[in-house]
Image (cartoon, rainbow, N blue to C red):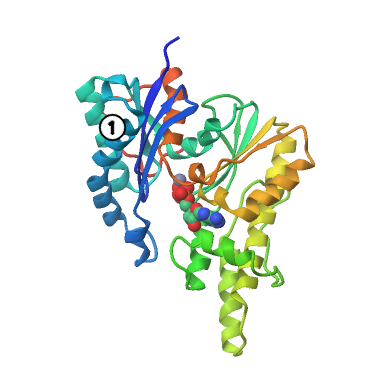
Amino acid sequence: EKDLLVLGIETSCDETAASVVKNGKEIISNIVASQIESHKRFGGVVPELASRHHVEEITIVIDEALEQANITMKDIDAIAVTEGPGLVGALLVGVNAAKALAFAHQIPLVGVHHIAGHIYANRLISELKFPLLSLVVSGGHTELIFMENHGSFQVIGETRDDAAGEAYDKVARTLQLPYPGGPHIDRLAHEGKPVIDLPRAWLEEGSYDFSFSGLKSAVINTLHNAEQRGEIISPEDLAASFQASVIEVLTEKTIRSAREYEVKQVLLAGGVAANKGLRASLTSAFERMPNVELVIPPLYLCTDNAAMIAAAGSILFEQGKRGGMEMNAHPGLDI
Ligand code: KG4
Ligand code: ZN
């Protein structure tokens, strides 16, 4: 049978990305142009700046993805693009580039949910085994998603306030660390000890929901109170204590839901999946559950990229999903 070549395009936040993926599983090329350096001095992503960078980069990145794959648009069977959620102006750049290419070359178009992309990043390294559970932890999302089959997403738990990555970034900002703060907190945490008492938001008995804003406020208050008393708090210990609270709740709720839903596999997804502490904690927890396979993507597939969008788009394409010229950006799209 003929190979399926899908061009993926991702512009939902601050990475302009394009990738070619074969049969939904094999990365042929994967180009990511990061804007982090431009947003850093503002301490976060500036939407208007992001859109403008995407416009400047998008054709270059797509050309590079094709060139690296050693193919032209004629070889592409479908174009998969992130249609939401994300920044509306940023998403529009990718959606319009995808529509223009699809129209000019008469190639089918598929809209992809950004979180489905993060989950399907796992299919680029491992065969998916259903039923499965995915812990999605990124700058905008913290969700436990149950999947009975390809393309079916059931949210069984989600954050009621801040996303995990958002909490990392806010705590990092309080500690005057550069944006994005997650990797910096992660590094500091490994140099400190979790000796500062911080809350864990378990919520109601049996709930798989999360909450991180109380924890974030507790970190800020701890720093503030110490300052007023003229005491010095070790940033390493504070980072370690914050990270311990986040990881303990994420790990525990993932284990409990994996047991309840009797899944064969647990997939880690999203930018916070790059966290060393979280990877280690889940790995050791699932070593004690040998009937469940834990899959953790390599770092370059955890943060935003277009290979994951092409991977998710390939499944949707095979299931018959098609987008038309009316496709639009959906900043608040539900999975
Ligand atoms: O998935 P992603 O690249 O973009 C979104 O879709 O949000 O995730 C970005 C988030 C940021 O909040 C960043 O601080 C966090 O992932 N992050 C980390 C680490 N690396 C990235 N958080 C904790 N530890 C890390 N090592
Ligand atoms: Zn993302």
Q: Residue at point 30% right, 53% down?
A: 50
Say left or right for 207 vs 171.
Answer: right
Q: Position of residue 12 (x, y in %)?
A: 36, 44
- Asked if residue 203 shows in the view, the reply is no
- Asked if residue 264 shows in the view, the reply is yes
Say left or right for 305 vs 220.
Answer: left
Q: Quadrant of the N terminus?
A: top left
Q: Residue at point 35% right, 67% down?
A: 41
Q: Is residue 98 above or below residue 274?
A: above
Residue 92 image-quadrant placement: top left
Label 1, on which residue? Answer: 98
Q: Is residue 130 above or below residue 30?
A: above
Q: Is residue 173 above or below residue 140?
A: below
Residue extending farthest to the bottom is 230
Q: Residue at point 48% right, 27% down?
A: 26
Q: Position of residue 127 (x, y in %)?
A: 59, 26
Task: Identify residue type, mark 1.
Answer: Ala
Image quarter for ligand 2: top left
Q: Residue at point 66% right, 70% down?
A: 192
Q: Position of residue 212 (x, y in %)?
A: 58, 59
Residue 257 image-quadrant placement: top right
Residue extending farthest to the top is 1
Considering depth in this image, is 26 or 163 the residue closer to the camera? 26
Q: Position of residue 250 (x, y in %)?
A: 65, 51
What SS does tag 1 mark? Answer: helix
